[in-house]
Amino acid sequence: MLDTTLANRQRNHLLDRDSVWLFGYGSILYKTGFDCLEQRTASLHGWVRRFWQGSHDHRGTPDAPGRVVTLVREPAARCLGLAFRIRPETLAALDVREKNGYLREAVALELGDGGRADAVTYIAPPGNGAWLGPASEPEIARQIATATGPSGPNRDYLLDLAASLRALGADDPHVFALERTLLALPGR
C-alpha cells in the first residue's frame, strides 16, 4: 500500500479527546504547516530515526524517489523530537501529507519536563509500498543528493532536519553522518 490516507482515517487512536499530542521527528520539526495549541520537546523510547523510507510525492518522484525518515524499532534507543498538542481534526490534513506509506500509530512519549503523554505519530513500516530500507551511508547520501520532488530537493530535507536536531540538542548519529557524507560529495 502506497497511499495510506484512507487507512489512517480509520485509525481513531486518542481522537475522543479535545486535543491530542502528535510526535514529530522528521520534516514536521522544521516545516510544521499546522496550528498547534502547545509545543514541547519529547522523546520516544525504543525507536530510532532512519532514512529508509522513499519519497515519491514530496522529495522525489515515482521514477527517482528521495529518502525521508521513518522510525525503526531499536529497544535501547531514544528518539528526540517535538510533541505538538493539536485538535484531532488537524490529523485529516496530516493524513494526506504523510500518505506515502506512513501509518498513524499510538505511542507513549516522555515530555521534556519529565511528564508522560499518550500521542500519535506517523511511522512508515517495513514493507510498505514506498519502503527502501537500509543502505550504506554513501548510497543513501548519493540518492538524497540527486532526488528532487514537488516539495524541493531531498538535500534540503536532510540539511534542514540536521539543523533542527542540533537546535533541539539531539544527538542523532545516523542523520549527522548522512549530512557529513552528503556535504563531502563532489559538487555538493
Image: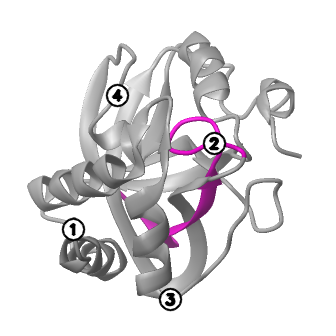
The answer, for residue 20, to whether it is visible in the render is: yes
Say whether marks 4 and 1 touch (CB < 8 Å). no
Badge 2, how many Cα within 10 Å: few under 14, some, many 20+?
some
Q: Earlier in the sequence, mark 2 or mark 4?
A: 4
Q: Is residue 115 above or below residue 139?
A: above
Mark 2 residue type: Thr
| Mark sitting on residue 187 | 1
Secondary structure at numbered mark 2: loop
Q: Main secondary structure of the magenta part?
A: strand
Q: Residue at x 39, y 27 (%)?
A: 85
Residue on which disc 3 sits: 136
10 Å crowding of disc 4: few (<14), some (14-19), many (20+): few
Residues at marks 1 and 3, CA–CA distance in whole angstroms:
20 Å
Q: In the structure shown, which secondary structural element does the residue marked by tag 3 occupy?
A: loop
Which residue in the structure is indicated by mark 4?
32
Distance from Cα at disc 2 to Cα at disc 4: 22 Å
Residue 50 within the segment the image draws in magenta: yes
Look at discs 1 and 3 and give the one toward the viewer.
Answer: 1
- The CA span between labels 4 and 1 is 30 Å
Q: Earlier in the sequence, mark 2 or mark 3?
A: 2
Q: Quadrant of residue 44?
A: bottom left
Residue drawn at point x = 50 percent, y = 59 percent? 69
Specify few, some or many for label 1: CA neighbours under 10 Å numbering under 14, 14-19, or 20 or more. few
Q: Earlier in the sequence, mark 1 or mark 3?
A: 3
Report the front residue among 66 and 15. Answer: 66
- In the image, taking residue 147 as reference, residue 131 lies left or right, namely right
Percent position of residue 138, x then y? 41, 84
Q: Which residue is under mark 2?
A: 61
Amino acid type indicated by mark 3 = Ser
Classed neighbour count for the residue bearing mark 3: other residues with Cα under 10 Å, few (<14), some (14–19), many (≥20): few
State the residue at coordinates (39%, 67%): 79
Q: Are marks 1 and 3 in contact (CB under 8 Å)?
A: no
